[in-house]
Image: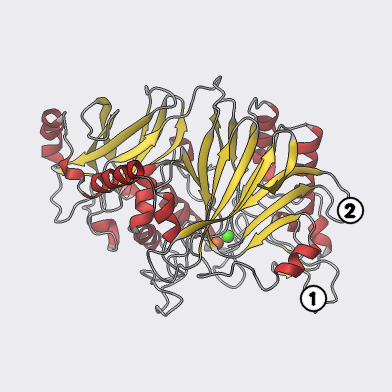
Amino acid sequence: MPPVATRNMDRRRFLSLTTAAAAAWPFANMSQSIAADRRVRMKDNPFSLGVASGDPLPDGVVLWTRLCPEPLTPNGGMPPEDVQVNWQVSTNEAMTQIVRKGMVTAPADWAHSVHVEVDGLESDRVYWYQFKHGTETSPVGRTRTAPREDVLLDQFRFAFASCQHYEDGYFNAYQKMSQEDLRLVIHLGDYIYEGASRKKNKTRPREHAGPRLAELQDFRIRHAQYKLDPHLQATHAAFPWLVTWDDHETENNYAGFIPQKGKTSIEAFPQLRANAYKAYYEHMPLRRTAVPQGPNMQLYRNVVFGQLVQFSVLDTRQYRSDQPCNDGIHSPCEEVFNPRSTMLGETQEAWLQQKLVSSSSQWNVLAQQVPIARINYHRPESTEELLISMDKWAGCDAARRRLMKFFDESRITNPVVLTGDVHSNWVNDLRLDYDDVNAPTIGTEFVGTSISSAGDGPRIPKDSAHVLSRNPAVKFYNRERGYVRCEVTPQQWRSDYQVVEIVSQPNQPCVTRASYVVENGRPGAVEG
Ligand code: FE
Ligand code: CA
């Protein structure tokens, strides 16, 4: 049972999210006169998908919403014209101390999504924000700016998550996360899944709307359906997010312009990718730098929290080499060792190196998708020496080695990698050479499990003993659902693995399963 103060705060937050219209709207006269001529008649509240904020800077943050009164219908129940939306930022939750406000166009071509890049705010400060169209108001969101670049915070708390297959389970993990005290949430991809709806059953409690995703309209409906989840919506409203994608926002295991084998044709894939990227931008609190151009979208970027922590948010899908050896889990074919293979593409790789070399942060974090540590999936009954997953960095051995060598030779301060994708929790030592048990540890990888993908999962996986004995660089391995909460100080990094045993039913508890720490200057995590 949380202390009384926390419960009151939670209750207030809950009320503000559900009865948003009660908030004052101090600039009503100005906004109504302009909004009146362009107001669109809607039978339901257009802010059904909630609000979000993201990519904080010391003086501002991105505010997001999308007007969508009928979320599961084509065009979201909106007319084919642009509409005007008012926004305001306040220093109190009651929205009575307004410090910034304005009006913005929600373009019909962009699904009436709204992206406001607010500036002129104070650094390292909590703000609340709200949107209005006509007489309809959005829920009130809470956000926080980053500290100034010369400030060394004494503590930074955030959480990271990935892989939220809507059909596989309830978002019980977000129910807990939305109640946490965090500065930031990071999403590492598989925010939506592209499959057609499948019938519900005992272990698959929810059902996708619509067909397998290919058309823009279907991507939009899928994003809207996910955003309707109350716990996902509450977590967006509670904290600023940093988002990046993996494969399922587009298509399983695609690589660059190469679609998944046996699904989309190579000719049709660029249009599908353009549709996927556009819908992703429309539904995320991203800056203008991420506006897609056809099938291209620049998502990789750097976000700095003063002198304490720098996040390099990566995109390991759009520019990567194709998975070698026909994808899947195999012993490595020759292509795995192709020196030209890449996970980031040349431009992003050079950008990353430049950002890391010029960083003055105590912790240098990669927020990215697939595991970097080489995991040997050798099974007891198999005679193979080494079995690796071709979709991961291990399948791009040259790229993996280049990154490890770079960490090492450039003496990057405290490199930490955050990873999603594999629907399981891992704590891994990052090494150049996994065949040499005495190879030095260069960095630390925290792999976070899925929010819901794969459904209810075991605390001790069947292959646990074998995986741990075969992979001395692995410190922790677990297959429950959940997320990872991190607490960073100048001296120590701490990751608390939050797990939910049951996602096949709603309202299930979330507990701390394990904690691992990294001490400043000593790569590799130990149980803490
Ligand atoms: Fe996934
Ligand atoms: Ca994935």
Q: Answer with left or right where residue 515 lies relative to residue 233.
A: right
Number of the label disc, if any, that sits on residue 436: 2
Residue 476 point in image, percent of width and height: 68, 57
Q: Quadrant of residue 253?
A: bottom right
**Residue toward you, 163 or 219:** 163
Look at the image and name its color scheme: secondary structure
Q: Residues within 10 Å of mark 2 (few under 14, many from 20)?
A: few
From the top left corner, tell me how far across and down residue 78 is, in percent.
22, 53
Give the amino acid type for the residue marked by disc 2 in the picture.
Asp
Mark 1 and 2 residues: CB-CB less than 8 Å, in contact?
no
User: Where ligand 1 lies, by image quadrant?
Assistant: bottom right
Q: Is residue 444 left or right of residue 236?
A: right
In the image, taking residue 399 as reference, residue 224 lies left or right, namely: left
Q: Give above or below for 85 relative to 499.
A: above
Left or right: residue 117 versus residue 37 is: right
Q: Which mark is residue 380?
A: 1
Task: Indicate the amino acid at tag 1.
Answer: Pro
Question: For mark 1, does the 10 Å Cα neighbourhood hold few (<14), some (14 to 19), or many (20 or more) residues?
Answer: few
Name the residue located 65 percent from the left edge and 25 percent from the top edge.
360
